[in-house]
Amino acid sequence: MENVDSGWEKKEWVCEGTYWLDPTSPSYEKGCGWKGLGSECRHGDYCDSFVEMVCPSCEFRIVDVEFPLVGSGTVTYTWGKYGSK
């Protein structure tokens, strides 16, 4: 998974196959072979913490990009109250 600030849009990606599965897995699917920059990919499904980037040719899932965290610091709970550090 790429972070939104990792430069994923400037990297070259290849639509190879189900990247999270071993190619010998029965669930493995082969991609179309498209090559291009992350910025050329389309948005797929939006999830709670990331968006799937899909191949512009066949819409196969190529990479997941995490959303930036909203807010700053960590939330701590003390004596029934919470605060941010």
Image (tube, grey):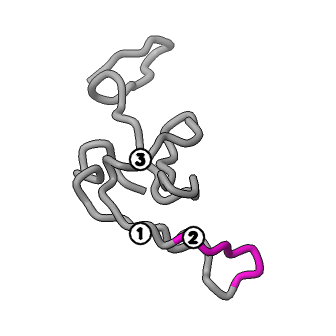
Please give the residue where the numbered disc 3 appears in the rendered image.
65
Q: On the image, which quarter does residue 2 sit in?
A: bottom left
- The percent coordinates of residue 67 (x first, y second) are 40, 36
In x, y percent, where is residue 11?
A: 26, 60
Q: Is tag 3's residue or tag 2's residue first in the polypeptide sequence?
A: 2
Q: Which residue is mark 1?
A: 14
Rounded to the nearest whole Å, what is the CA distance between mark 1 and mark 3? 16 Å
The magenta-colored residue range is 25-32
Residues under numbered marks 3 and 2 in contact, where contact means CB atoms less than 8 Å apart = no
Q: Nearer the viewer, mark 1 or mark 3?
A: 1
Q: Is residue 25 left or right of residue 53?
A: right
Name the amino acid type tagged 2. Gly
Q: Position of residue 30 (x, y in %)?
A: 62, 75
Quarter holding the C terminus is top left
Front-most of residues 76 and 13 = 13
Q: Are marks 1 and 2 in contact (CB under 8 Å)?
A: yes
Mark positioned earlier in the residue sequence (1 or 3): 1
Q: Of residues 52 and 74, which is closer to you in this image?
A: 52
Which class describes the residues within 10 Å of circle 2: few (<14), some (14-19), or many (20+)? some
* Disc 1, SS: strand
Pointer 2 residue: 31
